[in-house]
Image (cartoon, helix red, strand yellow):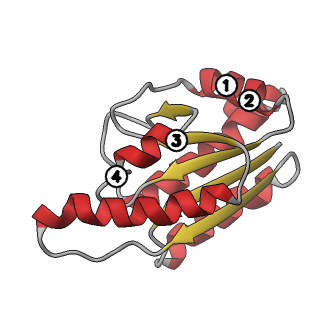
Amino acid sequence: MKVTILSIGKIKDAFWQKAIDEYIKRISAFATLSSIEIDNKAFKDPENAEVIKKQEAEIIIKRLEKLPGIIVALDEHEKEFSSKEFSTFLEQKSAYGDNIIFLLGGPRGLHQSVLKKAHHKMSLSRMTFPHNLAKVVLVEQVYRAITISKGKSYHY
């Protein structure tokens, strides 16, 4: 299985990166997980949020052109999975050897043009998480999903 996380915003705090690195290391026994971080655009005026999301979307779409695979956009308004359901989803999507690409937006979320490119959409939770925490949760859930499908005891 190959998983790519394409995210807006860089992880700046060492403790978040350490958690992500630990799960990537654990995942490496079963799959390849790579992370691509795109600088988020700063904005001070909330009215410019849609303009900034569109600029970020253009960068994401260019990156996706060079990155074939099944695109899964994270969006707070979409379907939530249990860990077991997510494991089944990943198992089904990776059965054909495709790269599974998770798109994680910045503080303003993902632009509609990116959401339209996604093959699937999902939510990590109905709650709102800081970007860094959302990435840690996603990587941990990928690890958990893999261990469930491999029958490992991590989930229990």
Please state the horizontal and vertical placement of residue 90, each as a whole percent of the image.
71, 31
Please state the horizontal and vertical placement of residue 38, each as a whole percent of the image.
51, 71
Going by the numbered disc 3, the residue's amino acid type is Lys
Tell me the tag on residue 109: 4
Above or below, 40 against 83 in this view is below
- Of discs 2 and 3, which sits in the foreground? 3
Residues 134 and 97: in front is 97
Q: Of the residues under marks 3 and 1, which one precedes in the sequence?
A: 1
Tell me the tag on residue 117: 3
- Of discs 4 and 3, which sits in the foreground? 3
Which quadrant, please, contains the C terminus? top right
Question: Residue at horizontal 56%, vertical 47%?
Answer: 138
Above or below, 72 against 33 in this view is above
In this picture, residue 67 sits left or right of residue 132: right
Q: Of the residues under marks 2 and 4, which one precedes in the sequence?
A: 2
Please state the horizontal and vertical placement of residue 93, each as a whole percent of the image.
74, 29
Where disc 1 sits, the SS reads: helix
What separation in Å lies between label 4 and label 3 (alpha carbons)?
A: 15 Å
Residues 47 and 94: in front is 47
Going by the numbered disc 1, the residue's amino acid type is Phe
Tell me the tag on residue 89: 1
Question: Residue at horizontal 17%, vertical 66%?
Answer: 48
- Of discs 4 and 1, which sits in the foreground? 4
